[in-house]
Structures are given as C-alpha cells and as structure tokens.
Image (cartoon, rainbow, N blue to C red):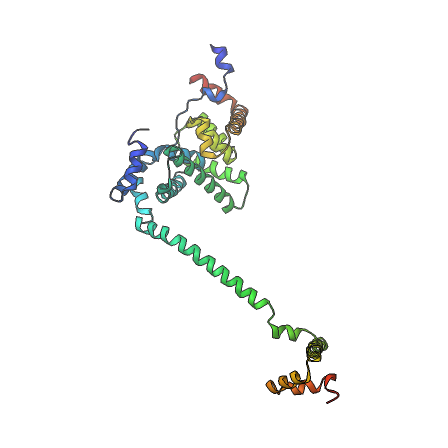
Amino acid sequence: MSGLPDKELLDLFRKEESRNYAFNLLVRQYQKPLYGFIRRMVTDHDETQDVLQNVFIKVWTGLDGFRGGSQLFTWLYRIAHNESLTHLRRMRRGLFTSHETVLERLTTTLDRSEHFSGDAIQRALQLAVMRLPPKQRAVFTMKYFDTLTYEAISEITGTSVGALKSTYHIASGKIERWLTAEQPGPTDQTLRKA
Amino acid sequence: MARKDHTRPLLDRLPRTDPFMVPDGFFERFPHHVQVALPRGRRSRAWANWMRPVLAASLVLVAVTLLLLRQWTTTPTPDMAMVSIPSEEVLADEFRDELEYHADLELSLADLSEAELAAWLERDPQQLDELLNLDLCAPC
C-alpha cells in the first residue's frame, strides 16, 4: 500500500490541527481497495458509494479507539466487511424476501449497469459469485479477488483459518460447477483464447 | 503442459481483472463527499466521552429510584396491613397483647411489699386504674 505508513497517519490523526488532513489522506489511501471489495459484494455503484461512505464515517468516529492491535488495513476491511453484510441483510429485509429474490435484483443491476466492462466469462463469474450466500461471497472475494491471506481474512471476519479454508473450498467448488454447467461453450472458448 | 492446464481448476485459469467500472473522477470527488458527511468536530466527541459516565450514572440513579418507588408502593404500610387483615384477627391480637401486659404487671407486682406498692402508686398514680383490673387488688 503506497502513501504514508499507518503509524504516521495515526499520529497525524490524533493531533487536532492535522486531524482532517490525516483523515483525507487515509480516505485517499484506502478508498480503492475498499470500494472494490464492497462493489463485488453489493454490485451497484451507488449502493457501494453509500456503504463506503458509512465505512469511513465509522472510521472517523472509531479511529481514536484503534490501538494498533492489527494492521490498519485489516481494521478498515473489517468495517467494510461488516457494513456490506449489514447492507445485504437490510436489502433482504427491505424486500421482505429470500436470498433468491435479492440475487435476482443484483443480476438485474449487473445487466443494466453501464459500469460493467466484463466479457461473457467475467459476467458469468460475477453472477456465480452473487449466487453465493453473503458470508461465503465475502470470503471468496477476499481470497480470490483481493488475494488476502487466510490469517488476514480470519482477523477480518473473526472466523478460524480452518473454517475459512472449508468455506473457500465450498464456495469455489460451487462457482466452478455453476460456470461449467451453465456456460460450457463460451467458457471453454474464452479460456482457450485467454 | 496442455494436459496440466486442463486439470487445473477453472477459477485459476480465469483472468482476475476487475470488470467493474467507476464513474469518471469518482475517487477524486469521494474524499470531499465523505468530509461533508462527517459528524463534526472533536469537541462533540470529547463531550460525548465526558457525558457517557454521567449519563450512565443518571440512568442507574433513575433505575434505583424507580425500583425503590415500586418497592414502596407494593409493600403494604402498617395501616394497609391492618386493613387487609380481618377485624376478628385484629381484635384477637389486641386482646392477646392486653392479656400479656396484665400478666406481666401481675407477676411484677406480686413480688412487691406493701410499702413498695404504695411507693409505686405514688410515683405513677395512673397505674391505679390498671391495678384495679388485676386480681392482685381484690383484697383492696
């Protein structure tokens, strides 16, 4: 992660005169990876923006209490993880419905989105990821797309490494099955080209 | 090599590019957007930190007061206890007290000599009425 080291950032944040400046740096430093994670979780850009904003508001109010027991990035990621899950839960409650209906809505969002540049295989992969239950989706996203270590994911989610390995194994197995079963032709062709 | 590729999990062979696009200039605008949405000022947090124990103490105080109030309103006062006991029982209790009082008086006066009894009556003439009700006074 480029930019100021966490310790310097935190020292600046704790001084009244440089607090806003430090927070601005922090947002600039971490907004992209957190946006990427949240976007993969909630799909829609506007909703991602809302969730990301809530994440940084929580960071602003809670950073004084951050004692550096973990890396700053892990701490931020944990907030983003929790906020994304809360958002998905709220969405489900708002629709008074099941995971399938939420999935339907997310699929429609993906299809309509002018901000999705992926090809057929990327679209199929994203749809498959969206079919996973939220917690599995989070673990899969962190491990597969963001290439975090199991230890880091364990700190973020508060789940044991063993359980995370099982979750990832199950999630990736499901995705492979869905990808090969639903789009055998395009997938094979795209893969050969790749 | 081709054989090896074929046996690799499908996911490992996919390019991990990010297909999600972000509106132009979003990451330049977003930090300002967040700054505007922030709850303002460290002072408010300092106030919140100072107020937290005060609020907690106030809540405890209110809870204790309510508890005591509830206790007070539900525990019957002596008068209320009397009201709730049937009148026969109250009379019986009063009569028993009276009997015990007289028995005590009788026992204590029986040991007195005439001079002591006269001195006792002189010191507390109202006790004469009591004395008249006792068998002890029958010879008088």
| Residue at figure coordinates x 66%, y 87% from the top left | B128
Looking at the image, residue B110 sits to the left or right of residue A138; the answer is right
Q: Position of residue B116 (x, y in %)?
A: 65, 83
**What percent of the width, then of the height, locates residue B74?**
59, 67
Q: Is residue A189 left or right of residue A7?
A: right
Of all residues, the one furthest to the top in this rendering is B1
Q: Would you place residue A126 above or below residue A59 in this image?
A: above
Quadrant of image for the N terminus of chain A: top left
The residue at 59%/85% (across/down) is B123
* Residue B47 versus residue A158 in the image, above or below: below
Q: Nearer the viewer, residue A57 or B97?
A: B97
Position of B94 with respect to A142 (left or right) is right
The percent coordinates of residue A180 (x first, y second) are: 53, 23
Closer-to-camera residue (A99/B137) = B137
Residue A131: image location, x then y, percent = 51, 33
* Residue A63 in which image quadrant: top left
Residue that sits furthest to the left in the current view: A17
Q: Nearer the viewer, residue B40 or A18?
A: A18
Q: Residue at x 48, y 14 (%)?
A: B5
Task: Judge whether residue B74 can be spotted in this image.
Answer: yes
| Nearer to us in this view, A55 or B128 | B128
Q: Quadrant of the C terminus of chain A?
A: top left
In this view of the protein, can residue A126 be seen by the observer? no
Figure disc tally: 0
